[in-house]
Every structure is written in structure tokens, then in C-alpha cells.
Image: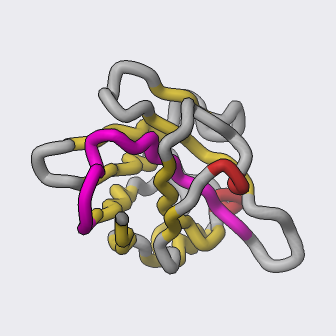
Amino acid sequence: QVQLVESGGGLVQAGDSLRLSCAASGNGFSTYAMAWFRQVPGKEREFVAGIGWSGDRTLHAEAVKGRFTISRDNGKRTVYLQMNSLKPEDTAVYFCAAGRVPLNISPVAYRYWGQGTQVTVSS
């Protein structure tokens, strides 16, 4: 079983950077694929980036490709989302997810979720 806690969100200006962290506890972290999703009020949860259990495969949504980078450190049991060149449209609650699945863009594929961290980008 895995518990996830996100951190690193905040209020920034357009063009700034943030790094989100997702700390995991429990067993089996190194065997789980990890992903970041984001959600704004009135919309469905949106895939942002995912990474395979070994870290050898990543997938980034077109909206963030070239600006955001997902990574993981299995020794620290932590997954990261480095966000550069932030835009107002990146404003959302960002969620960390884990599951014994291949890289998957659907939120229903992931079993474990954190509570989210707010990212707000002003213009």
C-alpha cells in the first residue's frame, strides 16, 4: 500500500518555475508507475506527465512538453515535477498518482492519489 503527499505548490508569476514533490510511504514504491495530473473547477482531471517504475520511460502532455519534466528517485521514494516557463493556464490543483500500470493518461488507471497542491500562475 502507498500513501502520497504532494508539496511545492504556490503563487508565482508567468515565466517563473516551481518544482513539485510527491513523497511516498508504504511498500512497493519502486514497482509503481507514477504520474501527475491537474484539475481546475468544472473540468475533468487532466494528465500532465507520467513515469514508469524504473524511470526509463516518461510521457508528457503536449500542453507541457518542453516546459515540464517528471523524474523519480526510488531511493528517496519521491517523484518530482519540474515546471519551467509557467503560464496562467497552468493554474490548477496538481495531484500525484501511483499504480501498477504502464504509462497511462487516464486517471482511472491509478489506484493511489495524494490530496493535491495548488499552483497559481499570475500574469
Q: Position of residue 102 (x, y in %)?
A: 55, 31
Q: Position of residue 103 (x, y in %)?
A: 57, 32
Front residue of 64 and 84: 64
Residue drawn at (20%, 43%) of the image: 73
Q: Would residue 63 be found to the left or right of residue 79 on screen?
A: right
Front residue of 69 and 113: 113
Quarter of the figure with the C terminus:
bottom right
Is residue 38 shown in magenta? yes
Q: Would residue 16 be found to the left or right of residue 8 on screen?
A: right
Front residue of 82 and 27: 27
Which range is magenta? 25-39
- Residue farthest along the top direction in this orientation: 56
Decide whether the magenta segment is chiefly helix, strand or loop. Answer: strand
Note whether 94 is above or below 53 in the view shown.
below
Residue drawn at (36%, 65%) of the image: 1
Note whether 68 is above or below 43 in the view shown.
above
Q: Position of residue 106 (x, y in %)?
A: 73, 46
Tell me how many marks there are. Answer: 0
- Residue farthest along the right direction in this orientation: 42
Residue drawn at (21%, 54%) of the image: 77
Q: Position of residue 10 (x, y in %)?
A: 43, 76
Residue 71: which quarter of the image?
A: top left
Residue drawn at (34%, 62%) of the image: 22
Note whether 16 is above or below 118 in the view shown.
above
Is residue 118 shown in magenta? no
